[in-house]
Each structure stands twice: as structure tokens, then as C-alpha cells.
Amino acid sequence: MAKFITDQGKEITFSESITNEGSYWVVDGNKVYKTEDVLVYRALKTDRGTILKSEHRNDFKQIEEDGKIYSIDSGLEYHFNYTSGTLIQYYHTDPIELLRNVIGRSGYGKGGNGEYRHSLLKDMSDAWVKASIDYVKNRVLEEKAKGKGHTIRHLDVMPGIYEKELQYRKQAGIKIEDEEN
């Protein structure tokens, strides 16, 4: 038995499969959830609390804990099946207080010459968050020009999430200086 947690915190238990059909979910063959919200985070939580995350298409991850197999695949791009655990999904409309703790950016620093690093949104410098707005907007335009708009739906909403983060920081009096000069 596995669990699916909706963005409203509703828990759905299922035994066979769950697939993303765009604007609705099919759980064990039945249409049970519909949303226009854009998925921005998906992970699987084991019974022990281990978080298993697939970053992108064909990024199959699997572990065994306490005799149970946990697996996840597809990042945010297409449907997947798994056997045990609790599916955690967050959407662009979820509170920034939640999103900033699970999504982030990766990169090689200014100019692409630094060491590769991944940071959660809550830990990114103010300058990095600001730069990410234009970077992602431009990447979306490039991908759409290549005819790949259908696979990057989540990127369309990321600039808005970065803007919400900056507003959150301003209201909370949070400033994070850039470590790079």
C-alpha cells in the first residue's frame, strides 16, 4: 500500500498505480484529483523518513529499508509507479514558507567556472535569487523555441516563486549576501 498526499494535505491510499494525466490524477484506475496547479516538487518519503527524489526524466531511484522497496522515477515530467512510501508533492501555489525548504537551484557559480553546488531557495543569496528570475525566463523561451514547452511547464512558474521568495525575505527582514565576489 502506498500513499499520495495532495497539495491540500489530503491523503489517498492506493495499491496499484498513480499516473499524472495533466490536469488530473488517475489512482488505481480512477480519476480522483484535478488541479490546474503546476507541480514543482515531487519526492517519496519512506516509513523511516528517508526522502527519495528523482531529479529528471529517466532518473530512477530505488532503495530498500526494513524489507520494503521504495522507488521513484521521472522528476516532474511524466507518470511513474512506486511500491511503498508516501508521495510528497508541492505545487507553485503552495506557501513560500514550504517551497523555500524543498526547491532550489544548482550551478557552477558566476560565469560557470566555480565548483558545482546545489542550494535550497532559503539558502540562496539574494543576488542568486534575483539572477535566477531572468535566467529561468530566458531558458523557458529557449526551450519553447525548440518545441519543448510541454516538458518544462514547471519552469514557467519558477520566476514567480523566486519573486515570492524575495518578497518573503523583505517582509521577514532576511538578507543573504553573495559568497562570490
Image (cartoon, grey):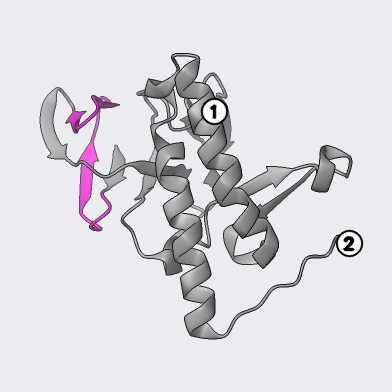
In the rendered picture of this protein, how many numbered marks are placed on residues?
2
In front of the other: 96 or 78: 96
Task: Give the answer, above or below, for where 40 lies relative to 96.
Answer: above
Task: Give the amino acid at mark 2.
Answer: Asn
Task: Give the amino acid at mark 1.
Answer: His
Give the crowd class for mark 2: few <14, some 14-19, many >=20 residues within 10 Å.
few
Image quadrant in which the N terminus is located: top left
* Magenta stretch in the rendered image: 6-27
Residue 14's image quarter?
top left
Q: Identify the element where label 2 is drawn.
A: loop
Q: Which mark is residue 87?
A: none
Let me know if residue 96 is in the magenta part. Answer: no
Image quadrant in which the C terminus is located: bottom right
In front of the other: 88 or 47: 88
The residue most toward the top is 147
Task: Give the answer, above or below, for where 106 lies relative to 7.
Answer: above
Residue beneath the point at 81% across and 48% down? 110
Give the crowd class for mark 1: few <14, some 14-19, many >=20 residues within 10 Å.
few
In front of the other: 105 or 58: 105
The residue most toward the bottom is 173
Residue beneath the point at 41% across and 23% down? 149
Let me know if residue 11 is in the magenta part. Answer: yes
Res. 109 in view: no
Residue 25's image quarter?
top left
Q: Which mark is residue 56?
A: 1
Residue beneath the point at 53% across and 52% down? 103
Q: Which mark is residue 181?
A: 2
**Is mark 1 in CB contact (under 8 Å) with mark 2?**
no
